[in-house]
Amino acid sequence: SNDVIISGQQHEKFYPDRWRLMQYFLNQQKYSSFFLPHPGFEISLRRHEYIGENYVKLLSNFWTVPVGVGHADGLHMKFLEMAKAYVLPLGSIPSYMEKIAAKNMCLVGTNESNEEMIKIIDDLFSNRKTLWERIVSYSTAVKKTYDANTMIPEIYRSILQNDSPCTNY
């Protein structure tokens, strides 16, 4: 597996945690990272094919994804997609997040110093077995709490039928 995929909207003002983590991962050599630009908001005009199930399949090749609650603290599809793909979110934790899932997410990139942020990330990646256990715990809790195995396919069908905004933001 690769270490980190950076995806979704990258905006310093609206998603400062995700932006900060993106800057770190794209400018370091310790961890492998891959940048996937936001696909756009109209499915018919998308920049790439990584939406819906294709996005989840791509995510499953990575250990982590930087996220940021940013200006919209709600049940975002990305947290369900990450659970389905068995990938751990790094960044800010939504206030609504189920307790076990929130405990296993990696709160980083928020208010700590750069040195503290790097230490948190290094500690997370220092033991891949422990990281995998966190990922499984996060994924299991999210899938159970939010019925992700049913909800995700239904949302994808709705989006594809309506050419509405893409899911991985």
Image (cartoon, rainbow, N blue to C red):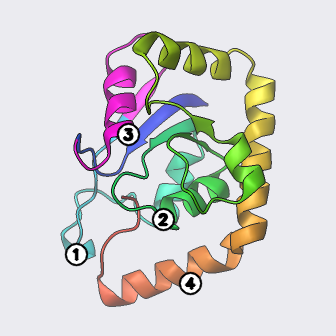
Amino acid carrying label 4: it is Glu
- Which residue, given by chain and number where applicable, does mark 1 sit on? 44
x then y, percent, for residue 127: 75, 18
Looking at the image, is mark 2 or mark 3 earlier in the sequence? 3
Which residue is at a point 69% across and 14% down the rendered structure image?
A: 126
Question: Is 91 drawn above or below residue 72 in the view shown?
Answer: above
| Residue 16 forms part of the magenta stretch | yes
**Residue 36 figure quarter:** top left
Gap in angstroms between the C-alphas marked 1 and 3: 27 Å
x then y, percent, for residue 9: 29, 51
x then y, percent, for residue 38: 28, 53
Amino acid carrying label 1: it is Ser
- Which residue, given by chain and number where applicable, does mark 4 sit on? 154
Gap in angstroms between the C-alphas marked 1 and 2: 22 Å
- Classed neighbour count for the residue bearing mark 3: other residues with Cα under 10 Å, few (<14), some (14–19), many (≥20): many
Amino acid carrying label 2: it is His
Which residue is at a point 40% across and 60% down the rendered structure image?
A: 168
